Image (cartoon, rainbow, N blue to C red):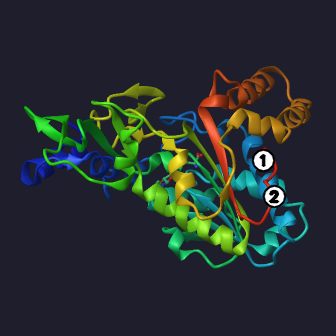
Amino acid sequence: MTPLEQIIANDIRANGPMTVSQYMATCLFHPNHGYYTQSTVFGSGGDFITAPEISQMFGELVGLALAQAWIDAGQPRRSTLLELGPGRGTLMADILRATAGIPGFHAAMTMTLCEASPKLRDIQKQTLAGYDITWISDVAQLDDAPLFCVANEFFDALPIRQFQRNGGHWHERTVGLQQDALCFGLTKSPTDLPQLTARMDDTSDGDIVEICPQAATICAQIGQVINAQGGLALIFDYGDWRSLGDTLQALRNHAYCDPLQTPGQADITAQVDFEALAQATPSAYSRLTPQGVWLERLGITARAQTLARNLSGDALDQHIQAHRRLTHPDEMGTLFKVMALFPKTTNHPVGFEP
Ligand code: SAH
C-alpha cells in the first residue's frame, strides 16, 4: 500500500466512500503525498510527456499565435501573458524565446503563471530564471487587463465528478473499500443537476457522464476577462465535444494503470469536455480543432525544415519523430484538440476557421 492509499482508506473507514472528484483531488494535490505536490513528473524520464516537452516548435508557434493576437488587438501596453498549469515551465520558456524579437511584446506583459504545486513552482523558477514572473494560484487574482493565455494539459488534471444513469435518475460514482481494497461504488440517493437532466436525451441506462465544475469556473473567469478586456486563450487538451463514458485514466512510467492503484504515484486525468468549456465562457469560442491541423496551419512544417538544417544523425531522427508525434493523426495530432476563446467583437484568431 502506498502511504496515500493508507490515508485514503482510513478516511473512507471514518467518513464513508468519497466522490471520484475528492479521490482525484487527493491523488493529485494531497499536501505531502499528492502526485503534483511531491514529484518531478514530466518529460521523457517522467510518467508522461507533453507537447512542449516533445519539441520547442510547439511553444514557438503558441507564442507567435498569442503575439499575433496582441498585435491584432492594437498592442495594448498593459496586458497579461498567462499560462495555466505550467508543469516544468518549458512551454512558457519557448513562448518567451520565440516572441523576444517582437517589439514591445515582452514589455507590455505581466508574465503570469497559475500553478498550485509549490514544488513545480520551484522548477518553473529555475526554467524561467531571468524573467520577471508573477505566480498566482487562482485566476480570480488576474488583473483586469487584456489577457493572452495558454493552457496545455491543464484542464484534464482538474477533478471530475462522475454520474451513472439509472432509469430517470443519476447516481454519483464514489470510491469506497471492499476487503481493504479501494473500489468504485455509487451513492444511494440520486443527484439532481441541470447538466444531468440535459443529458437524458443522449444517454441510456448504465451510461456514465462526467462533469468538471472547476473547469467551467476557470473557463468562465478567463472568458469574462477576455470578452471585456480583449485577448485570446488557447486551450490544448485531449478530449472531445461532450463527454460520454468513464474517461478516468492513470499513467505511470508511460503505461496505463488502474486509477485505484498506487494513488499519488500515477498521473490521474480525465478527457476534457470542450462543449462544457464553451457553454461556460461568456466570450466567443472557436471550432474545436485537431492539434495537428492547427500546428500545420501555423506553419510547423516550415519551422521543422528550418530547424532540420542544423541537425544530423540521431538528433535529426528525433526531430523528425517529434514533428510526427505532435501532428500525425495516429499520434497526438487528432486525439489532442485546441479551442480558442476570444472577444465576441473580434475575428477568429490565426489557425482557426470561422
Ligand atoms: N502544461 C504543462 C504541464 C501539464 S500537467 C505541460 O504541458 O507540460 C498539469 C499542470 O497543472 C501541473 O503544473 C499542475 O501542478 C497544474 N495544476 C493542476 N491543477 C491545478 C490548479 N487547480 N491550479 C493551478 N495549477 C494546477
Name the one closer to the observer, 197 or 158.
Answer: 197
Quarter of the image containing the N terminus? top left
From this viewpoint, is residue 133 visible? no
Residue 155, given in percent of the width and then of the height, sits at 51, 50
Q: Determine the secondary structure under disc 1.
A: loop
The amino acid sitting under disc 2 is: Asn
Look at the picture and state if 272 lies above or below 202. Answer: below
The structure residue drawn at horizontal position 77% and vertical position 38%, both measured from the top left corner, is 295
Q: Earlier in the sequence, mark 2 or mark 1?
A: 2
Residue 154, given in percent of the width and then of the height, sits at 53, 50
Badge 2: how crowded within 10 Å, few (<14), some, or many (20+)?
few
Look at the picture and state if 345 lies above or below 299. Answer: below
Q: In the rendered structure, are the residues bearing label 2 and label 1 in contact, judged by CB atoms less than 8 Å apart?
A: yes
The structure residue drawn at horizontal position 71% and vertical position 25%, both measured from the top left corner, is 328
Is 123 on the left-hand or right-hand side of 322? left
Is 49 on the left-hand or right-hand side of 137? right
Badge 1: how crowded within 10 Å, few (<14), some, or many (20+)?
few
Separation of residues labelled 2 and 1 (CA atoms): 8 Å
Residue 161, given in percent of the width and then of the height, sits at 33, 48
Can you tell which mark lies on residue 336? none
State the residue position of label 1. Answer: 354
Name the one closer to the observer, 33 or 21.
Answer: 21
The structure residue drawn at horizontal position 50% and vertical position 40%, both measured from the top left corner, is 242
State the residue position of label 2. Answer: 347
The amino acid sitting under disc 1 is: Pro
Look at the picture and state if 196 lies above or below 117. Answer: above
Q: Determine the secondary structure under disc 2.
A: loop
